[in-house]
Amino acid sequence: MQYVEYGAHNSQTVILLHGGGLSWWNYREVAQLLADKYHVVLPILDGHADSDAPFTSIEDNAARLVAYIDKHHGGSVYAVGGLSLGGQIAVEMLTQRPDICRFALIESVLVKPMKLTHALIKPTFGMSYGLIKQKWFAKMQAAYLGIPKTLFDDYYRDTCKISKEDMIAFLQSNSAYSIKPALQDTQAKVHIVFGSKEQASICTSGKLLNRMIPDSTLEVLPGYRHGDLSLNHPEQYAQMLLNLIG
């Protein structure tokens, strides 16, 4: 797994995991805001542009990150955050290792499997994959995903680098992921957040996570869509993380 890092290496470490189809730049502005206080690590998830391995599963990505933390950070870090697919991987890290971090910020995470969506992903992307390299289509997708214009060039460049196989793999994993009983053993203080304009499955998932994770907190952001917080409001995201850390 590849990593982009900000801040001093002797500071407390915060790991932020980007959404599916995006990359480390999902959190670039957040990292810049936090870099004077923390060592911020932005992994490039498997199967994404400039990654060093194909995407296999959410569980495998989480295990690789746990191994990285064991090797480079003594078995735990200060905080972990993640958006959508990255948030699922963060949840899985909390599941695999209860003491992997002290704090976690989970944004717009699906943990309620969507069987129909899962079944349609392969045939749909098998037919439409070629469109992702068309700039007009990329602009339409970016607008739908709420990606700010300042990040469009990054989005278009890196989306074009994702193979059809990897895109299908991480989208299928995203639609099929569900929480495991061991999540309730996490020792992290967890804040769960999603927007009021998100799909009902995300809202339901946020409430499921809140019930499963002891002493977790839940926040619904009025008027926000999927990923709005970290992509379009980096100052608010950074402040939310600082408030969580306290």
Image (cartoon, rainbow, N blue to C red):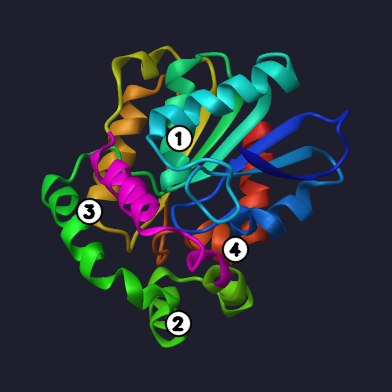
The image quadrant where one finds the N terminus is top right
Instruction: Tell me which numbered mark, 2 or 3, is placed earlier along the sequence.
Output: 2
User: Mark 1, mark 4: which one is toward the viewer?
Assistant: 1
Instruction: Tell me which numbered mark, 2 or 4, is placed earlier along the sequence.
Output: 2
Q: Amino acid at mark 3?
A: Ala
Occupied quadrant, residue 40: top right
Q: CA distance from mark 2 to mark 4?
A: 20 Å
Instruction: Tell me which numbered mark, 1 or 4, is placed earlier along the sequence.
Output: 1
Tell me the residue that label 4 is attached to.
233
Q: Are marks 2 and 3 in contact (CB under 8 Å)?
A: no
Q: Is residue 117 left or right of residue 159?
A: left
Q: CA distance from mark 3 to mark 1?
A: 21 Å
Q: CA distance from mark 4 to mark 3?
A: 22 Å
Q: Amino acid at mark 1?
A: Ile
Tell me the residue that label 2 is attached to.
139
Tell me the residue that label 1 is attached to.
89
